[in-house]
Image (cartoon, grey):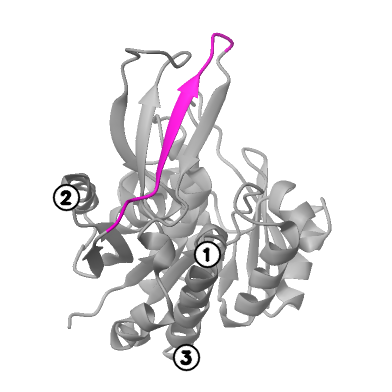
Amino acid sequence: MARFDVVLIGEILVELYCEGPLGDGTPVRLGFSGDTLNAAAASAAAGARTAVLTAVADDQLGDALVRRVADLGVDTSLIQRVPGSNGAYMLHGDLTGEREFTYWRSGSVASRLDAADIERHAAVLAEAGALVVTGIGSALSDTSRRAVLTAARIASDGGAAVVYDPNFRARLTTAERARAALAEIAPHCALVTPSCPSDARALLGTGDPESAAREARALGAAAAAVTMGADRVVVADADGLVTFPVPRVAEAVDATGAGDVLAGTTAARLALGDPLRTAVSLGIGAASLSVAGQGGTGLIPTLADTRTAAPTPPTA
């Protein structure tokens, strides 16, 4: 089987979007989203041959989902089509502009992935340049957590750069379980990308980005990139601690998925041979540009645009 630069494991969600309050006859727009799809699209745009390993329902909605993945330049050959339902969520706003999310993902086909599903593709993972997994994938179910950890072990043993975005979601799991998932996967990771203060406080016990970066490395990760929204990104690696500025985007519309874009872009560039700090700077550039689009894949920048936006990697 052909080698992929980047493989991602996780759930792709059906998105139902409506403006304003819910009611009988409210128009709803169908789309597809989720951290895995956002990161995969960014990885492909950053020049990597990218594939998603997941499960999708074998119905017409699943057909449309797989077409969307392919349209984003992502290989679909590792997607299993199985009986069941896809995870879904509804996104809607009220008159004040606040957004609300309603999820339906319990028992979804992707949440039923287990270690055996991963082991069937062990050769693909062992030959990949990078693997992207997230705390959301770890939190979907006990079997999904086993799948994520199995994939990280196989990929790292094969020499892949494993990138783990903790993406803590209190609706899916407890802080205690998410901390345990991070601790068990960190030793397999080339990079973890916790947000601060959200992930950092819940999983690393601190709201200080520098301390969070050090704590993540203390768990066994080779490097950490702690994101602080539009403020800065703090990176801790074997060469020390450095801070990257985040470029300002005047036409910012929606920050949804920016962290996913950073993870996917960084993984792609690591797989293609860039040094860690260069890869992270390109991830920051892509993420900063992505906020000018609506939704996680509303604007996935080209590699040329990403290079222009990326901050200069610090040297100390």
Q: Above or below — where is 210 with respect to 170? A: below
- Identified at 49% across, 62% down, the residue is 137
Q: Secondary structure at mark 1?
A: loop
Q: Is residue 108 visible?
A: yes
Q: Which stretch is magenta?
A: 84-96
- Identified at 50% across, 43% down, the residue is 258
Report the Cα–Cα distance between label 1 and label 2. 24 Å
Q: Is residue 79 magenta?
A: no
Task: Pinpoint residue 213: horizontal percent, then vertical percent.
Answer: 73, 64
Report the amino acid beneath label 2.
Asp
The quadrant in which the N terminus is found is bottom left
Say which label, 1 or 2, has the lower sequence index: 2
Disc ID at residue 157: 3
Circle nearer the viewer, 1 or 2: 1
Task: Pinpoint residue 33: horizontal percent, then vertical percent.
Answer: 37, 43
Horizontal arrangement in the rendering, residue 133 relative to residue 11 (left or right): right
Report the amino acid beneath label 1.
Ser
Instruction: Decide: few, some or many residues near mark 1? Use Cα within 10 Å; few <14, some 14-19, many ≥20.
Output: many
Residue that mark 2 sits on: 63
The image quarter containing residue 289 is: top left
Residue that mark 1 sits on: 141
